[in-house]
Structures are given as C-alpha cells and as structure tokens.
Amino acid sequence: MNTIPEQPETEIPGPRRIPDPKRFEASRLVLWTDAFMNRFIKVGGLFVVVAVIGIFVFILSQVLPMFQSAKVDIEGSAGFSDPLPEGEYVAIAVDEWGERPFALRQDGRFFFSDLADGGKVSEGDLAFLENDTISAVEAVPGSGVIAVGTAQGGVHLIDYSYEPVFAAGKRTIEEKLSKAYSGRVDGAVREVGFGQSGAARLVVTLVDTADGQRLLATLIERKRSLVGSGAWRETAAIDMTGALRSGVAVKSIHVTDRADSVLVIFENGEVDYHFRSGTEASFELRQTFRPFQDLEDQKIAESGFLFGDVSLVFISATGENRIYSLYRTEEEPVRIFHQTKVFKALPEAAEFFSKSLRNKAFITGYRDHVSLRFSTTEKVRWESDLPFQVSHALIGSKYDSLLFLSDERRFHRLVLDDPHPEVSFHALFGKVWYEGSPEPKYEWQSTGGSDDFEPKLSLVPLIFGSLKGTFYALLFALPIALFGAIYTSEFLHPRNKVYVKPVMEIMASLPSVVLGFLAALWLAPILENRVPSLLCIAFLLPAGSFLIGWLWSRQPQAIRKYVPAGREFLYFTPVLLLLLVAGWHLGPPLEQVLFRVKDSASGEMVGDFTRWWPAVTGTAYEQRNSLVVGFMMGFAVIPIIFTIAEDSLSNVPGSLRSGSLALGASRWQTAWRVVLPTASAGIFSALMIGLGRAVGETMIVVMATGNTPIMEWNIFSGMRTLSANIAVELPEAPHHGTLYRTLFLGAVVLFLLTFTVNTIAEVLRQHLRERYKLV
Amino acid sequence: MKLSLDLLNAGMMAALVFPAWSRADEVVKVDAAIPVYKTVSGVTGNLNSIGSDTLNNLMTLWAEGFKAKYPNVNIQIEGKGSSTAPVALIEGTAQLGPMSRAMKSEEIDEFEKKFGYKPIEVKVAIDALAVYTHKDNPIKGLTLKQIDSIFSSTFKGGGTAITKWGQTGMDAEWADKDISKYGRNSASGTYGFFKDEALLKGDFDASVKEQPGSSAVVQGVASDLGGIGYSGIGYRTSSVNAIALGTSPDALFEPTYENCLSGDFPLSRFLYVYVNKNPEKPLDGLTLEFLRFVVSQEGQEVVVKDGYYPMPAEVADEVLAEISK
C-alpha cells in the first residue's frame, strides 16, 4: 500500500535562519550620514545666523565712524618749523599739501618754511617794498593772492602759487611769487579788503588822506575765454567815501569772491552791505545791521566769510558767535543778511578767524585757545588749549591739518582727523537751516557741481518717500489682493480655483526691473493724460459690481439656475470689462467738463487735468508719480498678499464652514463672520509680508518715479525712497566718504523700519492667533 | 534717476544720431592744423570708460572710430553721470573718466590720497550751453542778468523776477505772454554749470520744469510757444532758437563756435576726459592712443558730427603734449 510516509521533521537544507544579531543596529552608512547631516545642518544654520549678524555688523561698522568727533594731534605735531627771523608778521598762507607755509613780514619780505624737511626757513625771492611798511593786509585763504596796503599809500596784489614736482618717486613743492598789481593812493592805507572771481578783482582800501578818511574801490577785470584769459586791466575806480560815518571808525572790510559785494564793519558793531550788480561800476547800500543788537556790548571782535561767501561769521567782544546768511524772503525781494546760526560762545573775544576751503568749517579763538566749528551742524567740532600762543591760524586746504604761527614765530602744523564734519544726529534727522534758504528744513541733496556746495543729508525725506511709496502701493494692492483671496477661497468654484492660484503665483515671479521698465516707459505716458479715465473707472467698477449683483438677485430662478454658485464670474467678467472700456472713454469728456483751466497761451478755458491739478491744489503734477508707482508696486505686492491670505483662508477647517451654513448663514455671512476672523492671523501675516516687500522695493521706484526727495503726500508727484536712493547714489559715492556712510545709514534705517514693522506684526499675529484659536 | 535717464536716452538716440545742422553757414570746420591720426602697431586690450551721460554719445562714436582702426581693442562705455567718473578712476574700474564739468577739489583730494598725484584733465570738446526759445519767438537775445531773473529765485545777479515776455522788452502780442521755463534735473552736470554761471550759484525758481534729459528740454521748448530752456549746443534742433547771450544788452553774442572761442559767449565750457597718469611714467599705450585719436582731426570731426564744437589746434596741441609726457 502506498501511504504517504510521515515526513520526518527535517531541517530545510541551506543556511541556518538564525536572527541576525545586528538586526537592531542601523547600518554604518546610515549612522554616519545621520551624524554628518546633524552637524552639517547645525553648522549651516549657525553660518546663516553668523552671516546675517555679520552683514549687520559690517553695515554698522560702515556707519559708526561717521559719528566720530574731530581729533587733533596736539602733541605729535606733524610739522614744527625753526623760528622765523625777528619782526612783525602780518599774514600767513600755505600750499594745499600743508608742507611749505610762508609768512609775510611787515617790511614786505616772505619767509617760507619747509615742514617736510625739518622746518628749515628760507626767504622768498620776491621783494616788492622799498623803505615802506605794510599797514593793512588781506590774505583770503585759497585765493592765491595777498592784498597789501602800505604806510606810504602803496596798494599791491601779490600772487602766490605752488607746483608739485615729481622726481624719483618723491614729491616736492615749489612756490612762485609774483606781483600782480600795484597802485597808489594819497595817504596811509588803514584797511584793505580784497575779493576775486575768475574775471574780476576788487580791492577796497580805507585811506588816511590829508582831508580825512576815504574809502576807495578799484575794479580790475580781465576777459576770460576758453582758450585762455586776457591780462588784468584796471577798469574802474569807485569812490565809496560816502559809505563812511563820521566819528565811527572802520574795523574791517570784506569783499566777496564774486567781487560784487563789499561789507564794511564798523567799530560800534554795525555792518554795511554794499552791492554792485552785474557790470555796473557803482555800489548801492543794501543793508545796515548789527549782528549783536540784543547785547550790551555790540562790538564785533572778529568776522569773516565762510567758504562760498554766502555766510558771515561774527564773534562779539564778549565771545558770542553767530552766523548771518544771505537769503531772500517773500517780503524782501533782494538778498540780505539774516541771522541763521548761533554757536556756543567763546569765553573771550576772538583774535583770529579763518575758514576751511573744503566745507563750512571755521577756526577761531584767542591766545592759546582754539575752537574748530562747523556751520551746517552748528556744532563745535573741537576746542582746546594749545601749548603755545597763536598769532595766525589757518585750516589746511584739504581739511586735514591746522596751521598756526605762534608768537615765537614758529609754524605749527597739527594733523586734523575729521572725515565727517557734516554729520550730526540733528543734521540727519532734524531740520537744518542751510545757506541761502529762508528757513530750516528737511532736505536731501547730497552732491553739487561745485566745491562750495553744502551737502544736505537729511534722511527724513527718504524715510517719508519709503512710507509714501508703500502707502500708495498698499492702497492699490490691499483691497484687490484681499478681496481676491476671499473670493477665490470662499466663493469661486474649486474647479476654477485650481487655475487662478498658480496664475497669481506666476505674477509674483515677474522681475521688478521689468515692472519698473513697463511703468516708466509704457504706463506713465499712458496715464499722464488719462487720469480722468482712471477716476471714472475707479467709480464705475465698484458701482457696477453692486448694480450687477443686485440686478442678478432680482432675476427669476429660471434664469439664475443657469449660472451655478461659484461661477458668477461668467456674467460678471464681460460686464466689468465693458465698464472698464466705457470708463476709459468717458474720461476725456469728463475732463472737458470738470477740469477746466485757463490756458496761458491762448487765454481760453480748456479741459486739462494735468494743468488743472497744479492750478487747484498748488502742488505739482509729474508724469512719473506715486500713482504709477502704486500701480506697478501693486503688481509686485498683490501676488504675495493674495497667495498667503488665500492659503490661510483655505486652511480654515471645512467643519466650521459647514456648521455655519447648516445653521442657516449665507455664504457671505459665513465668509465674513466665521472664516475671516479664524484666518485673521494668517491674513495679517500676508499684509505684513506685502508691506515689507513694498518698503524695500527698489527697481520699480527707481525707474517709475522722478526720484525727487520731496515731502508731500500729493499722489501726482514722485518720491525718493531709502532703497532707491542707495541704488542711485552708491556709484557716485567715494568709498568711506560721508555720502557712502550716509547711504549705509539709510540701509540701517530701512532695516530698523522693516524690523519694527515685522516685530509689531508678529506680536499682533500671536495675539490674533490666541484669540481665534481653534479648539 | 540716472537709470531711468539711460532708458530715456536710449529712446532718444534716434534724435542724436542725426544732428540738426541744417543751416549751411553754421557748419563748423575742424581746425586743419590738428594732426591726422596715425595708426601705430601693437594696440590691443580692454578699455573701460565710466562717467558723464552728456558725453555718452561722443564716447560711443569715438569708440566706434577707434575700433575700426584697432579691431583687437574692446571698449566698454558706461554713462551714469559725471560724478561716477572720479569714483571709477579711484577704484581703478575705468581708465577713462569722461566728465561734463571739471573735477571738484574734494574728488581730486580723494584721488590724490590714493595715488599721491592728481589725475590729469584732458579737454576733448567744446560745448556752448545755449538758451533755447520757441522758433516763432522773435526775441534775439537776453543778458545774463535777465536770465538770472527768469530762472532763479535768489536773483544773485541783482534783478527782480521776470515772469512775462513783456518784461524782457518785447511788445505787441508777446507783452502779456507768460514765460514757461524748462531746465534739467539736479543730478546733471549741465544743471550745475548753469546754476554756477548763469544764476551765480543761486537757486532755481520752483516754476522751472525739471526735465530728465537735454533733449526733453529742447522738446519742451519746441512744443511751448512761451517756452525757454537751456541745454548743450549738441541738442539744437530746427524747432528752437538758440538765442544770443551777453553781459549787457548792447553786447549780446550768439552761441557760435567763434564766440565760444573768443569767450564772448558767456556760457561756453569744455568737456573733459580724466585719466590716471603717474607724472613720472608715460600713459599706458592703449589709453594714450585712444586720447590721441580723440584729439586728432578724425576725433574732432566726430565732435562736429555730434553737434558740439571741436577744439582749436592750440588746445589740441597742449592736450597732446600733456598726455604724451
């Protein structure tokens, strides 16, 4: 019989299936990868933190040196000359490198000292006086001319110039002295004033003649052309004796660098301002004023022009220090002097004064006390006592040194380290009274074409511009993005929603430079003459929407059933497009009716919004204005706000929505009362991220506005934002200069601005989330 | 501003390529004494130019002419404004720094701090900063004092405000016509020059419409009967008049080449290219050849073609002597 034999329990041949003792261990590779990634991510994260902090530290390191105060090295004197020969020295001057100063002795001899070569003293090769002594002198720094009046009635102009000579890698300075003009008056010269422009020189002398004092002005002119200048010729002698007062002595005379104004300062503290207009050879008295009218002692101890000859510095006999600037007001049709600045008083009357040739700094003081002050910021940059008595002082031409002639007849050159005198907290964020302006104001104008330009570095107009741009961008973007998000998430049919969202997100990927380009070259010229059309559209679109909605709801069910819920756009879109076209074409007729203005050419009334707006509001109408920026920045901001807001709305649990609808709330009530509050934290984040994007947006603003740093909310003028300002001005800012650092400060301000906004936003968001937390 | 300016300028290239030298009697001839450029061998390499936007077209034309002679030379030109030239020279990002104004002392200081010597200023062309009026405006000329009274709010010239054409001495239908003023934006070197020379460093009146480019000024004046504006002579068109200027009413001078040279026309200026030249060493071959080309007969013909004025032979000789030192 065939039976199936019971199979013995045999082991299946092959390897024994014992459990791998390492089966609970992870493979080496996994462990290794894990450990590596763990550290790698930590290190990476750390690097990110370090990089962000590093950037901030770098920016701060660029900004902070701006606020350093002036440093003058009193001890390690950079130059110290041998004593000059005995005698009375009446004037000093120096080359622009500060290496070869000279002093003019009363007998008309020049003594140079070579500070780069141990301070050796040598005599200049020009002797222009014989048996005569200098009784009056005027050496305006930087003019290259010393005007001299003598006891015997000589009037001389001495030209001096320096030339660098390079040999074997070393620079040496060579001087040149020459007599430019000599004249005679009948009597000893008591005072002399001198000023020159490229084409005219004016010498004013106060002369003691046999029949009393006389004030004489000599005009020396030359013809200037591109290929060279003609010779100086004396063209007019003007007798200004009538300007003198009997019984009041003249203290000093100043002439401006355009040779058109003479300031006579009297011993009793009065100042006369005489002006010669254009080519006229006569002066008119424009103003008489007393700078220290309110003081008991009205005497003026020292006075002089600041660089640019617009502002006069006065120091009273009691040490009070004020600045008077030329400007014009509405009431006063000509430019006269007004007080603009008051400095901390000196302890005593000043004995010397000199101006800087690079900025609005000046140096003044008495005996061994010296004060370096800066006009724009109204600050004392440096003040100290020197170990010697000062008889003459100068600020080095490059604003890098101070030069003194001591009463021991030695030159002392002190190194001045003050790279950013224009900066103070007040100058950056406060109102400053700039030269020539009738009132203190916030102003940004960083560079000018000439040396004596006063930089205006107020960041306030830029901060204002950033806020203005953001405001108009959000004004346009917010309603569209938010209502768009609510509609898409709550009302639109899901089948259509699938397409809408990606399309909006593609919009976000448009480079802002493209948007800016479109705004500047395409949108701005179109909008320029179509503002009335925009107004029409802005009115027609919302009004039309309400009307359609209302009309639709009145239709019988038989019609309404063809458009299911979520597909309302099928009838809305064509009608809205129609309204858009209608609004666009209604604009010009509306303009003819509403915005009528008198045409200055023909004298007739014409409809023109671009002229109507300035005529009615008194503010400008520019082609590249905030409206254009608002539109284009809106395009950059809308997708961001839309996407985030839509996400947070869609994330609201469906159960809430269903519950609300089941209890009988309409779709609108559900969206507005249930979904929106629940998603409010997310929507708020969307807003803030949009805001952050708008504040920092650069290219659109650079291209679509005129970048005018103005401070007005006018929608039809432009703005200059902090970020646009950095983009525009960085290429022309020399490294480590004041402008360069100020631009970095703009970056810091921008950072603080977004930081503050984000912090507030985060706090509010947490608050909202707490409040509408889902259980 | 400058970025948007560049865009605008690009759009206006068409207007610049065909300068409006229609009047035969005004065609300027280049001084025959200026030497013709002689090609030398072995000139290759890269040349960068960063600076003035006024000079941008001229630089481009010069670069084209130069490249035709030396095919192995590569020239890049960037024109963002005169103020960018000193920075580029200091940082060494450009060998040529075209500027429509002279360098400021502060800029020279910065340069000298880095290199120990000053940059050299190479004069390359002459520009007359002309004052334009509408072609139907019969006015012949204005004094600088009147110009100051029209454009400024500070009246440094000593006059009082002029707002109607009647105040300049015109009568009949012009007496009551408003003056409509056009000017440049503050970033421009032309703005600065006009401010310094015509307004005597005063301030512009707020009613001066700031245009983004020189051609926009000319276009503005051309389309405005009561218009007045200022721009370089290279932007003159047949729809505007470049009026005569002077210091007194009986000595007014048109912005012609002769009047610029003699100095009679008060608003003439040089256009410059700044280069970094060590006073102890000769200029590098490529830069030297380019500058020699610019001040040659051919280079100066390009100047005329672009509407500006060429330099007289004596100035060209001086320039040549200085750069070949």
Image: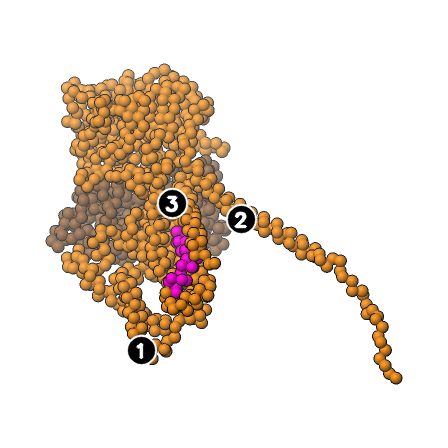
Chain colours: A orange, B brown
Q: Residue A240: image x %, image y %?
A: 17, 28
Residue B13 seen in the current view = no
Identify the mark at residue B84; answer none if there is no mark.
Answer: none
Q: Residue A91: image x %, image y %?
A: 32, 23
Please tell me whether the stretch drawn in magenta is mainly helix, strand or loop. Answer: helix
Determine the residue located farthest toward the front in the rendered image.
A663
Q: CA distance from mark 3 to mark 2?
A: 37 Å
Looking at the rendered image, the disc whose residue lies closer to the viewer, 1 or 2, is: 1
Label 1 Cα neighbours within 10 Å, binned few <14 / some 14-19 / many ≥20: few
Q: Residue A62: image x %, image y %?
A: 45, 40
Q: What secondary structure is found at the residue carrying circle 2?
A: helix
Magenta-highlighted residues: A670-697
Identify the mark at residue A48; answer none if there is no mark.
Answer: 2
Instruction: Specify the amino acid type for callout 2.
Output: Val
Name the residue at 22% across, 62% down: A591
Chain of the residue displaying label 1: A
Rendered position, A346 above or below B64: above
Identify the mark at residue A556; answer none if there is no mark.
Answer: 1
| Residue A247 covered by magenta stretch | no
Q: Which residue is mark 3?
A: B83
Most foreground residue, A565 or A249 = A565
| Residue A680 covered by magenta stretch | yes
Name the residue at 22% across, 22% down: A296
Q: CA distance from mark 1 to mark 2?
A: 63 Å
Instruction: Specify the amino acid type for callout 3.
Output: Ser
Looking at the rendered image, the disc whose residue lies closer to the viewer, 3 or 1, is: 1
Name the residue at 26% across, 24% down: A316
Please say if the residues under marks 3 and 1 sit with CB atoms less than 8 Å apart: no
